Image: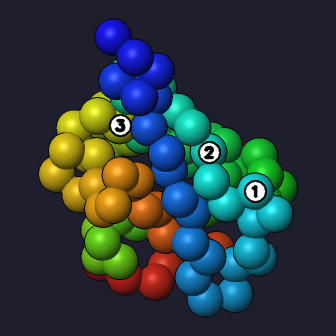
Amino acid sequence: MGLEDVYLIVLFKQTGDAPILRQNKVKISRQEPFAKLVEFLRRKLGKDQVFVYLKEAFSPALEERISVLYEAFGVDGRLVVNYALTPAWG
């Protein structure tokens, strides 16, 4: 099993008044829960509350595995995650 089978690329896209991340791509284990991405964003943005969306429409359950979300919503070999400081969609 190669590294591409264990990890995948997540691309963060800023929405609304949220600041643009200096590092907008991360590599994460497919087995991690979505909550790990949300916690990463909270730390990077220095905020307690961050609104996170897939497909510019909905927020997945925090316990959902990254691999499941990638299989359903991955685009061009990455999972695109939109983030905002105030509610944006859904």
Marks 2/1 in contact by CB < 8 Å: the verdict is: yes
Looking at the image, the residue that sits furthest to the top is 1
Q: Which residue is mark 1?
A: 23
Residue 58, x across and y down, in percent: 29, 68
Residue 64 picture quarter? top left
Cα separation between marks 2 and 1: 7 Å
Question: Is 16 located above or below residue 22 in the figure?
Answer: below
* Residue in the foreground of this view, choosing between 2 and 80: 2
Marks 3/2 in contact by CB < 8 Å: the verdict is: no
Q: Disc 1 marks which amino acid?
A: Gln
* Residue at 28% from the left image edge and 46% from the top image edge: 70
* Residue at 41% from the left image edge and 29% from the top image edge: 4
In the image, taking residue 26 as reference, residue 67 lies left or right, namely left
Question: Is 87 located above or below residue 39 in the figure?
Answer: below
| Secondary structure of the residue carrying numbered label 2 | strand
Marks 1/3 in contact by CB < 8 Å: the verdict is: no
Looking at the image, the residue that sits furthest to the front is 2
Q: Disc 2 marks which amino acid?
A: Val
Residue 26's mark? 2
* Residue at 33% from the left image edge and 61% from the top image edge: 76
* Dot 3 crowding, Cα within 10 Å, few <14, some 14–19, many 20+: many
In the image, taking residue 38 as reference, residue 70 lies left or right, namely left
Residue 33's mark? none
* Residue in the foreground of this view, choosing between 42 and 8: 8
In which quadrant is the N terminus drawn? Answer: top left
Which of the two marks, 3 or 2, is nearer to us in this view?
A: 2
| Secondary structure of the residue carrying numbered label 1 | loop
Looking at the image, the residue that sits furthest to the left is 72
Residue 50 picture quarter? bottom right
Q: Which residue is mark 3?
A: 66
Cα separation between marks 1 and 3: 19 Å
